[in-house]
């Protein structure tokens, strides 16, 4: 790792998925403002997360990463942030008990405001406008004014992320994350949902364990607060580069916009700008790997992004699709393992399972999501490797964006409460159901 590459050097590499800003002066002004902004996270916190993910790499911990497909500025409210945090904490309690190992909690929040798109433009009723690329770039409304990329939005991303992190830190240290309270929420879910009752046995086991701990007077600090970290896709170079700083403690570069950042499927060119920038920072990082990734590709990414083979530094987030994971993943895991590469394997069961419903909504089948996770576990079990975690797009609200699950949402029902501005998310109930099902897989693993 060496000096931070300049924006000019990164743009010379022809980066993909970048907005075309009409006013270069406005871009310079936004970047200058971000360069002087205080860090959103600290280098020591990033190092702590690296240590935690190193435990995932060794099979001694499990990673739960979840949150919005694309955050919105309007969504930065106490209720919204609390609901997302609540469902992640609920999931983590179930997974911790089932796996009997620590669960690393990583929010897909406080920075997930930009999205790559398959097309630069969108056409409706014969009118073509720039595609919506997330609130970090332009507005969702289908008007010429809203769709113009505005670099001032990058500053708003920073401000919104700061507000979100302040809320999260207050919640996780102020009693909201108390283990007994979170378990009570899960108990309510099991008792109030007809399909939730299938998970009653596990909920009862957790209850007995907590009762035992109380009876012997055990009340550690860990019962009342949790460690929680932030993450997002490192997509917009102006934002990520301007928030990459030299740490005064170590004289090494860190991205201070989040604890963990990842490279997406569409921007993982080995000689591209995103790989170049993330190869220089000390944060723990991830990279999405899909069906087109060869075993040699995986080794090349590891060599470029983690040349020292540091445990916890690199996470491979696989997104094959339910129908492809059992055939595509084994060769990657086998070769990476044979070469002695230290990497955490995490399953993204969302992005390979998207389709358009008959009603026109973009959606995912809950059964496909579960099947991809099951395939991920099957592959690792057959190879004797550790299925290190799951990466899920979810919300703490009762939306109707993915079909299936215990609530049996159908394609017609998607219109009831479809709120995502990009990809469909699991709702609160589907997320908890996923946690209990993954818990069963962990017990078998």
Image (cartoon, rainbow, N blue to C red):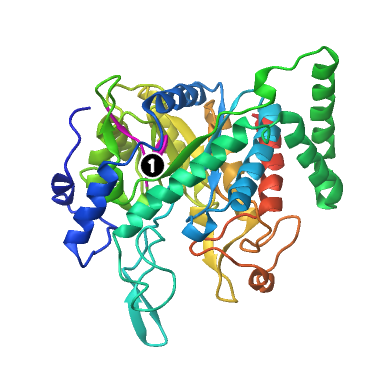
Q: Which of the pair 42/68 is nearer the observer?
A: 42
Quadrant the C terminus occupies = top right
Asked if residue 410 is positioned above or below residue 177 in the image, the reply reads below
Quadrant the N terminus occupies = top left
Residue 209 vs residue 92: left or right?
A: right
Q: Is residue 192 visible?
A: yes
45 in the magenta segment = no
Could you tell me which residue is drawn at 18 percent across and 47 percent down? 7
Could you tell me which residue is drawn at 71 percent across and 40 percent down? 436
261 in the magenta segment = yes
Residue 254 vs residue 232: left or right?
A: left
Chain part drawn in magenta: 253-263
Residue located beneath label 1 in the image: 262
The image shows residue 442 at horizontal and vertical percentages of: 65, 32
Residue 101 vs residue 292: left or right?
A: right
Asked if residue 345 is positioned above or below residue 116 in the image, the reply reads above
Q: Which of the pair 299/240 is nearer the observer?
A: 240
The image shows residue 50 at horizontal and vertical percentages of: 43, 25
Could you tell me which residue is drawn at 34 percent across and 42 percent down? 294
The image shows residue 166 at horizontal and vertical percentages of: 51, 40
Give the quarter of the image for residue 218.
Answer: top right
The image shows residue 126 at horizontal and vertical percentages of: 37, 87
| Element type at mark 1 | strand
Asked if residue 439 is positioned above or below residue 47 in the image, the reply reads below
């Amino acid at each position: 790792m060496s000096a931070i590459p300049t924006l000019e050097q990164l743009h010379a590499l022809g980066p993909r998925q970048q907005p075309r800003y009409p006013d270069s002066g406005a871009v310079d002004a936004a970047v200058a403002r971000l360069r002087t902004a205080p860090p959103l996270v600290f280098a020591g916190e990033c190092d702590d997360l690296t240590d935690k993910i190193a435990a995932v790499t060794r099979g001694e911990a499990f990673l739960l990463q979840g949150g919005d497909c694309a955050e919105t500025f309007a969504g930065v409210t106490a209720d919204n942030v609390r609901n997302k945090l609540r469902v992640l904490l609920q999931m983590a309690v179930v997974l911790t008990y089932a796996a009997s190992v620590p669960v690393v909690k990583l929010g897909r929040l406080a920075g997930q405001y930009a999205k790559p798109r398959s097309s630069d433009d969108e056409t409706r009723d014969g009118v073509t406008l720039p595609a919506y690329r997330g609130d970090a770039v332009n507005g969702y409304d289908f008007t010429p004014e809203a769709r113009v990329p505005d670099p001032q939005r990058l500053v708003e991303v920073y401000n919104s992320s700061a507000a979100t992190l302040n809320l999260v830190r207050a919640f996780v240290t102020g009693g909201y994350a108390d283990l007994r309270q979170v378990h009570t929420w899960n108990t309510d879910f099991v008792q109030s949902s007809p399909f939730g009752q299938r998970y009653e046995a596990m909920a009862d086991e957790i209850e007995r364990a907590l009762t035992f701990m109380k009876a012997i007077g055990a009340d550690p600090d860990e019962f009342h607060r949790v460690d929680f970290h932030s993450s997002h896709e490192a997509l917009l170079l102006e934002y990520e580069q301007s928030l990459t700083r030299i740490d005064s403690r170590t004289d090494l570069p860190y991205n201070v916009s989040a604890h963990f950042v990842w490279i997406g499927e569409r921007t993982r060119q080995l000689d591209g700008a995103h790989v170049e920038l993330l190869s220089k920072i000390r944060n723990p990082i991830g990279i999405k790997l899909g069906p087109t990734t060869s075993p040699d590709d995986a080794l090349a990414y590891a060599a470029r992004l983690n040349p020292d083979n540091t445990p916890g530094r690199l996470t491979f987030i696989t997104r094959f699709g339910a129908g492809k994971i059992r055939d595509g993943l084994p060769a990657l895991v086998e070769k990476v393992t044979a070469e002695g590469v230290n990497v955490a394997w995490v399953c993204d069961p969302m992005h390979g399972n998207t389709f358009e419903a008959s009603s026109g909504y973009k959606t995912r089948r809950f059964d496909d999501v579960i099947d991809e996770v099951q395939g991920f576990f099957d592959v690792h079990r057959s190879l004797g490797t550790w299925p290190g975690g799951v990466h899920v797009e979810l919300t703490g609200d009762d939306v109707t964006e993915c079909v299936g699950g215990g609530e049996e949402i159908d394609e017609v029902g998607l219109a009831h409460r479809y709120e995502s501005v990009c990809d469909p998310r699991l709702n609160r109930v589907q997320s908890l159901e996923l946690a209990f099902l993954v818990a069963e897989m962990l017990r078998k693993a």
